[in-house]
Image (cartoon, rainbow, N blue to C red):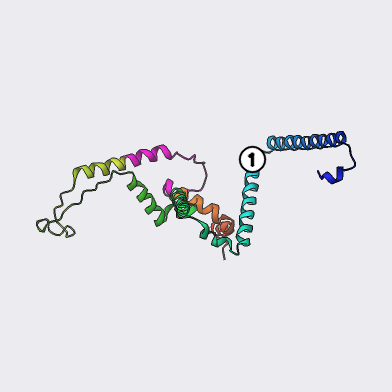
Amino acid sequence: VDEGALGHMSQRQKRLFKLRMKINKGRKANKKATTDEQKRLDDPHWEAKEKAAERQANKQRWAKEMKDRGLTTDQSYLFETAETAEQKYERKAKKDKGKAAFGWDVFNQDTLYKAYEKRLDQLPKNNSTAIVTKEDGDQLAYGQVVNDDKGAIDRMAQELNDKIERNKKFSRRRTELDGADVDYINDRNAHFNKKIKRAFDKYTVEIRQNLERGTAL
């Protein structure tokens, strides 16, 4: 409160006026808290919306700070330390590694290779290096006898068995409706066809119906 505006008041009146201002401020704060609590109870997504609004405000404040310094948001890395940059890179790499494949990307070569690398990470590492001598001959030549490590073979077999067990726990038998069109050859192909249908059925349903009726041009 501006003290100049209270110059005509006595000390008791000033104290009373300031007390009323504090009471009004507390009343407004209580009303806002009650309103926020009611919104939180009525809207299950209220907390997420509040966090999103806070993130947006921080982003705008950060963009304004970059603009005041004469930089764009793409140049903000200039203010990052090496440690911060490394942490951001590691978080992004971890997120990309654990990211699930989308749609028809489930069966492409990159995803299959990514799954292969993930399986390799679960195998024990062998730091020993095999030394190939002249007596061993060319190991790539056809018909050569190769003395494989029995322990490595056992680990590979165990890993395959573990994969089969994981697949049994993960996959579940989908219910099949009597009279439904069978356009697949196995469960994996049926799963792939469902993904294709979700993406393209709205464009191809009329063409497919015309082909089934024999009325396609």
Residue 135: name its quadrant.
Answer: bottom left
Q: Residue at x 39, y 56 (%)?
A: 109
> Would you call the spot at circle 1 few (<14 residues within 10 Å), some (14-19), or many (20 or more)?
few
Check the image and name the residue furthest to the left: 135
Q: Nearer the viewer, residue 10 or 182?
A: 10
Q: Which residue is mark 1?
A: 47
Q: Nearer the viewer, residue 176 or 46?
A: 46
Position of residue 165 measured from the top left corner of the image (x, y, whole percent) = 36, 38
Callout 1 secondary element: helix
Position of residue 139 measured from the top left corner of the image (x, y, whole percent) = 17, 57
Check the image and name the residue furthest to the bottom: 217
Magenta-drawn segment: 162-188
Q: Is residue 164 magenta?
A: yes
* Left/right of residue 211 with respect to residue 161 in the rendered view: right
On screen, residue 18 above or below 134: above
Q: Is residue 134 magenta?
A: no
Q: Residue at x 61, y 49 (%)?
A: 55
Quarter holding the N terminus?
A: top right
Quarter holding the C terminus?
A: bottom right
* Left/right of residue 33 with respect to residue 163 in the rendered view: right
Three-letter amino acid code at the position of disc 1: Glu
Position of residue 127 measured from the top left corner of the image (x, y, whole percent) = 24, 48
Q: Residue at x 37, y 54 (%)?
A: 113
On screen, residue 35 above or below 104: above
Position of residue 169 measured from the top left corner of the image (x, y, whole percent) = 41, 37
